[in-house]
Structure formats: C-alpha cells, structure tokens
Amino acid sequence: MFIKAKKSLGQNFLIDREVLEKIVSITDITNKEVLEIGPGSGNLTTYILKKKPKKLYVVEKDDDLAILLKEKFDTEIEIINDDILKVSESTISDQKLSVFGNLPYNISTEILSKWILNIGSNFWFDSLVLMFQKEVADRIISEFNNSNYGRLSILSSWKLNVKKILDIKPQSFSPRPKIDSSLLLFTPKENFFELKDPKNLERITRIFFSQRRKMLKKPFNQVFNNGKEVAEKATINGFYPDIVVPKALAVGPQIQETFAKAYKKGVGISFGTDAGVFKHGQNGKEFGFMVAAGMPAMETIQSATITNAMLLQMEQKIGQIQKGFFADIIAVDEDPTKNISTMENVVFVMKEGIVYKK
C-alpha cells in the first residue's frame, strides 16, 4: 500500500537508515514504554521495535496512514488515530514514556509549548527526542546574549534540559523539505521554579519577543499598564540570574492586579523601601504605579508619610509638617495630585531643619 505524503499535514517521511539508527540509540528504550508522534509510513517505528520496548504507542492523525500502520505492524503497536494536540498524553499510560517524534514543522512549537505548559510537578515522560526545523531548534537551545534567545528558549529551559543531537539534511527525507532539520533531546529538570499559572509565562514571553527589543514600550503597556520595573529588567540580558527571569516575567502582571484588589478591599497600604528591582533614586516611580492601580495621588503620598509614621509608632514626631515634629521636608515643582510623576523629581530636601538640596 503506497501513500503519498500530504503537504497539508506537514508530512516529510524520514528515510535515512543511518539517521534512523542514531535516533533510536540516543536513549535506552529496551523494556520501556515508548510513544511515537507522527510515525508516518512506519520507518522509525521499525527501528524502535528492534530495540524491544515493553510497549509502543503511536499517535497518527492521518486516517490512511493509521490503516497502513495497522496492516504493517498489527498487534506490535497500539495506534491512537488522533491529532496529537487533542491527545492527553498523561492518560496514555501509567508509566513514564520515552517519546520520539518527527513533528510536523507547522505545529512543532505548538506541540512543545502544550507539553511544557501542561506538565505538573510529575512528568509523564522521561525523555523527548524530537525533530524540528533547524532554525526553530536553534531558538529552543539558545542561551542569554544570543540573538536567537526568546520565547521558546525560556519555555524550554524552564522545566527541561535541552541538548542538540544532530543536524539532518533535506535528502534524509521524502519528500525533501527545503530546509535543514535538527534533532533535540529533552529531559526533565529535577528542580525548577513552580508557577501558579504557567500560561502567564507563555503569554508574556509571546508579547515581548513578538516585537523583540526594538519597541518594548508597546508590549509593556499591553501587560503591565505603564510598565513595571520587575518585568522591564527581566528583559535585559544578564540583569537577573537565569533562574529569576521566568519568575520576574510571571509575577509582573500580577503586581498591579493584586495591589488594585487590596486597595479596593480597604487593606492598609504603606509606601515601602524594599524595592531592590529599582536603581537607587528611582523609587519615586512607585507613586505612579500606585495611581495607575486606582489609588488617589494624595493617598499615595499619605502612604509614604502619615501611614508609615503610624506603623513606626512615631506619628507624634514624623509624617506631618507640624510644630514639634522633625523638620523632614521635601518639595517638588508641580502639584502631585495633578501630575504624580513630579514625585520622581525632588527639587528640595530638608532633614531635621538642615537643607541638603535646593
């Protein structure tokens, strides 16, 4: 039975025997349960079976190819005739799976993103050996300070160790694609930062890296209203350690929302100084962020003066301009209730009656 590859399904069958042999030799699958994605005409399937796995599941969307695989392998494999994007991989087996996939290039990143975002603390696989377009693979394995570094790099390195195994030329396939391919090995990390909602990470990185660094103001406004320092610094190469970047990108959108909810519920808010994400002298930006979240300008100023004085139990000495209080005074050029950003430009400073700036 001969079946012609369907361009609409991104089918390019791997026919190079040397490459097929290398693929099944990457990990030990003897007596293990294996999942193959997109087996096509069964070339890689044949080599997997030679390694004597305990069980081999294959997911094939093409109805004609599913029939061909049934005729060719019969009971040697279990065929799941469905779209891999609709399959719940964790329900296929109660054992960890070794996964092989010559992924359709038009949905390869969608498949990978789906798996990463849906992985909980317990991985349903022990390894992923996956084929990608070389350009995509280079983005996946890219590190900081590299022009290829982006959304796929962050998502992949969050929970997985990634290693390139080999590059594969077009002549190894039928029909021949117009581009080179690369084979990557993914293995679970033992330790990674847990995110409450992993989809936030995907959403934020998609917004940022769809416009790269040529115009960051627009994506910042999309996610953080006026742009929050935490998220801004997370996009600067080397500003935070690698392990901190996903957390910084993920929590950024939550900061403004959490603040707004707290204020509306009547939670007491004081102006803090534990703002390590700011450069020294830029803490005044916090006033603007608080106003953007719905807090009136005068209340933000009170949170930095009267409220903090009460928390320090020094309300009879500081926090107000009154007789008998410490003469700690600052001044700005404009009315902050009309232009809160003026709080970022202090033009006069007095401490205990001594003028330090005027």
Image: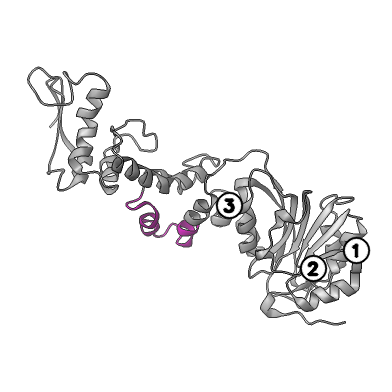
Label located before the other in sequence (1 or 3):
1
Q: Residues within 10 Å of mark 3 (few under 14, many from 20)?
A: many
Q: Give percent across and percent down for residue 121.
A: 64, 43
Label located before the other in sequence (2 or 3):
2
Residue tagged 1: 76
Looking at the image, can residue 142 be seen?
A: no
Q: Give percent across and percent down for residue 339.
A: 17, 47
Along the line of sight, the residue nearer the viewer: 66 or 111: 66
Label located before the other in sequence (1 or 2):
2
Asked if residue 7 is positioned above or below residue 284 in the image, the reply reads below
Residue 81 lies in what quarter of the image?
bottom right
Residue 39's disc number: 2
Residue tagged 3: 155
Along the line of sight, the residue nearer the viewer: 130 or 136: 130
What is the CA distance from the residue labelled 2 to the residue labelled 3?
26 Å
Give left or right: position of 65 versus 312.
right
Q: Which residues are magenta?
A: 206-227
Mark 2, secondary structure of its residue? loop
Q: Give percent across and percent down for residue 149.
A: 55, 54
Please count the marks in the image.
Answer: 3
Asked if residue 305 is positioned above or below residue 253 in the image, the reply reads above
Q: What amino acid does circle 3 point to?
A: Leu
* Residue 221, magenta (yes or no): yes
Residue 60 lies in what quarter of the image?
bottom right
Q: What amino acid does circle 1 point to?
A: Glu
Residue 96's disc number: none
View extreme (front): residue: 265
Residue 194 lies in what quarter of the image?
top right
